[in-house]
Amino acid sequence: MPDVFISYRRDDTSGYAGRLYDQISASFGAEHVFMDVATIEPGSDFVEVIEQRVGACDALLALIGKNWLASKDEQNRLRLGSSNDFVSVEITAALKRNVEVIPLLVGGAKMPLQQELPESLQPLARHQAVEVSDAHFTREVADVIQSLERRVKKPALDVRKRIKPGLVALVLLLLMAAGVGVWTWQKAQHDRGDAGHQANISSPVNPPNIVADANISGNWRAVLQKEAVTYETYFTFDVADGKLFGKAIYPTGEAGILNGAMNGDKISFITKHVPNFSEEEATFTIEGHISGNEIQIWMQDKDGLSKGIARRVAQLGRPRVLTR
């Protein structure tokens, strides 16, 4: 299920944004739609928070109304392109992180020309825009939703590709073992001819067991405990060529997976986010051991170690603190 970020300007397209949010939430679930990062906690680096939120999404829908390009602040300066403009920061972050960006033209708006945009937003002009009319809003947004499902959906991992490296290594080991056996047999024949003594032929070397990467792609709910506190954390995982991608949803906020790696039945990664109760960035180092449909989780931060079990779930939820 794709995660979608809705970017809009309140004095331009707030009504359309609300309708868009309701329709996409009905299709993907509210937990997969992000909007209104204007509620960022005081003291937080809003540029960093926006980049984290946008970076955790699969697509950004940029709502463009008639006043989107010409909107001005209290000092009568153009908002677009300002380092303090949420809309500019959101779209720039999406373009920079190669997030799918779809301009939605509402209220009769036209797509801005490249030369009308500030330099950081000029790549937006190369993205195919979608006109959404008032009369056919529901139908045309439904088309956008179908497009998101086709264009953003992560391809299923090919099990054969994941097992192939292990098979290659196994074949190489077997060939090496066979070579050792032939060499030993030839040496024994030579020794027997020279000395008339029989030599024991060595048995082939048994290759070590090679564990193929487990298939953990999808959503997981972990119940973790740190001292007397028990809480939930949700994960979305995707694996490609031994690298682990996805995101974590903590009771304190969301974070993308960084430096993710998978080796057989073991995973490791880190996350960084600014908790909603703090001004400091929190870094978590996570390791896991996969056993069937469970992952044993160890999660370390500056305040201590959390441990628990993660199990598959159909969809992500809102993490809760279960006991204190």
Image (tube, rainbow, N blue to C red):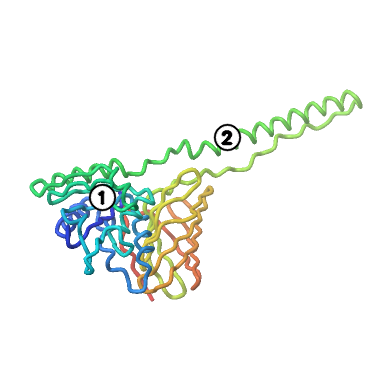
Instruction: Rate crowding at label 1 as few (under 14), some (14 to 19) or many (20 or more) other CA atoms within 10 Å.
Output: few
Residue 276 sits in which quadrant? Answer: bottom left
Say which residue label 2 marks: 168
- Gap between marks 1 and 2, in whole Å? 55 Å
Query: Where is residue 315 drawn, in percent x and y?
Result: 31, 54
In the displayed structure, does residue 20 sit left or right of residue 197? Answer: left
- Relative side of 230 to 198, left or right: left
Q: Is residue 127 left or right of residue 289?
A: left
Q: Which residue is mark 1?
A: 116
Nearer to me, 66 or 286 = 66
Residue at far right of view: 195
Front one among 301 and 139? 139
| SS label for mark 1 | helix
Q: Position of residue 152 (x, y in %)?
A: 32, 44
Amino acid under disc 2: Val
Helix or strand or loop: what does disc 2 sit on? helix
Q: Quadrant of the C terminus?
A: bottom left
Q: Nearer the viewer, residue 68 or 143?
A: 68
Q: Residue at x 20, y 60 (%)?
A: 71
Q: Is residue 161 left or right of residue 323?
A: right
Q: Position of residue 144 (x, y in %)?
A: 21, 45
**Crowd around label 2: few <14 · some 14–19 · many ≥20 (10 Å):** few
Residue at the image position 10 percent from the left and 49 percent from the top: 134
Q: Compared with residue 35, is residue 204 higher up or lower down, i.e. above or below?
A: above
Q: Residue at x 29, y 62 (%)?
A: 86
